[in-house]
Amino acid sequence: MKYLQSVKMITIVCLLLIAISCDREKKDFIPLEHMTFTNAYYKNAVKISYYILIDNPEPAENMLKQEIVKYVENRLKKNKALTKPEISSLNFVFYRKTDNTSYFITHKESAGELLGEEISHYQQDFIANYLVSKCGSGTVEKIYLYNLPEETVASKNCDK
């Protein structure tokens, strides 16, 4: 009987440890596809902006940059927009998922309305821009973290 009590205690401790390890916050990138914006003011310099929410973003700056770079690289593998001659750049705009920005998961921005909702109203939740621009026969990729200087992530086949 003494051993049965010990086995029960060990089992409970193991289950608690498993529950705690499974409860780690997962970092999710939530693309807001319905908010994709195409700036076509100039016929041969079209810019596409994608809005993405990050649920539980990494608090460490260098880890956050790595997560964003990895996300954009995966999106670029699937996205062939830069192969079109009229597209000059892609802009990935990242916001923290909060009660305020979660509204945009199921709603479009309502700019211009009296009580319109725009994601840009929530600057406290703004995290970063990741800009991919055509340059010669390649691209230049820059990340701009909110309140931090820009950082060139990659420059492929450009004369800069």
Image: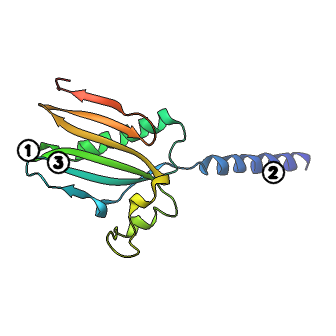
| Of the pair 99 and 17, the residue shown nearer to us | 99
Q: Indicate the position of residue 139 as horizontal and vertical percent values.
A: 20, 33
Q: Provide the residue designation for mark 1.
A: 85
x 20%, y 44%: residue? 89
Could you say which disc has been placed on residue 81 in the image?
3
In this view, the mark in front (2 or 1): 1
| Of the pair 19 and 81, the residue shown nearer to us | 81
In this view, the mark in front (3 or 2): 3
Q: Quadrant of the C terminus?
A: top left
Q: CA distance from mark 3 to mark 1?
A: 9 Å
Q: Provide the residue designation for mark 2.
A: 8
Q: CA distance from mark 2 to mark 1?
A: 67 Å
Give the amino acid type for the residue marked by disc 1 in the picture. Pro
Give the amino acid type for the residue marked by disc 2 in the picture. Lys
Which label's residue is closer to the chain start, 2 or 1?
2
To which quarter of the image does residue 140 belong? top left
Give the amino acid type for the residue marked by disc 3 in the picture. Ala
Q: CA distance from mark 3 to mark 2?
A: 58 Å
Q: Indicate the position of residue 30 as horizontal and vertical percent values.
A: 40, 56
x 46%, y 40%: residue? 147
44 left or right of 34? left
| Element marked by disc 2 | helix
Which label's residue is closer to the chain start, 3 or 2?
2
Q: Are marks 2 and 1 in contact (CB under 8 Å)?
A: no
Q: Indicate the position of residue 10 as horizontal and vertical percent values.
A: 78, 45
In this view, the mark in front (3 or 1): 1
Q: Indicate the position of residue 108 as horizontal and vertical percent values.
A: 34, 68
